[in-house]
Image (cartoon, rainbow, N blue to C red):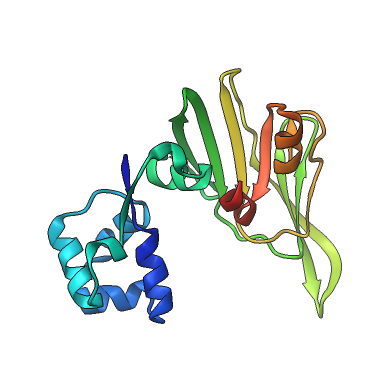
Amino acid sequence: MCMDYSKLWKLLAEKGMSKTDLMEITGLSSRVIGKLVKNETVTTDTISKICTALSCDVGSIMECVDEKSLSLFRYCRAYGKLLEEDDRTKKLGFVLDGRKYTVFFSKRTASKATHICCEGDGTVYWKQYHMAGGVVRPGVEKYVLVKPVRSSDESVIIVIKGKPAMIEGLDEGIWLSPGRQKETGKTGVLVLTESEFKLY
């Protein structure tokens, strides 16, 4: 079982408040708010301060849930451990139902001028086109985002922050889209946007 603070964020949204507002009215630090975001353990004093500030009871801001009922995204947020980090990606790892997961999160936010390329050499490339007045101009920046290495008992997920114009090469070779993986049950490297990962 684990604690889930999703109710707190929903309550803040209903009250038109932000996490910064919560910090100001409770005196909690950004570190403590970060722990709540990750569904990590906090003190009862922290819970008491939040309930007092928001005039609510404990059940209005948190609940105890079975880890198996969490989505993959929420499980990753709650239990993912930082394995490594560079200027392009953050790599987290966790184990769920006996299966090892490695998740790469892009640090840069993709836009309509971004193409993510899943190529036959096993590398994910980030291609950033230059836009001017809503029109693509000559010149493109291309670099390696990640070249994942996986074992047979491991699932690798690459999560792209933002909304790229397209993710090229999905469902070819090792590269899979969420729908195709669910449809076929095939294992490979799943490449998807952050919004897709939240729903996966």
Quadrant in the picture for residue 165: bottom right
- Residue 7 at x, y percent in the picture: 37, 63
Q: Is residue 176 above or below residue 50?
A: above
Q: Of residues 46 and 158, which is closer to you in this image?
A: 46
Q: Position of residue 65 (x, y in %)?
A: 36, 45
Most foreground residue, 39 or 91: 39
Q: How many marks?
A: 0
Left or right of 165 on screen, residue 60: left
Residue 113 pos. (x, y %):
76, 64
Residue 189 shows in the view? yes
The answer to whether residue 147 is above or below residue 34 is above
The residue depicted at 59 percent of the width and 33 percent of the height is 156
Q: Residue at x 70, y 42 (%)?
A: 178
Q: Quadrant of the N terminus?
A: top left
User: Residue 66 vs residue 96: left or right?
Assistant: left
Q: Say which residue appears at 12% left-offset and 61% top-offset.
A: 45
Instruction: Name which residue lies at 60% across and 24% down.
Output: 150
Q: Is residue 81 visible?
A: no
Image spot of residue 176 (x, y percent): 73, 36
Which residue appears farthest toward the left when viewing the image? 45
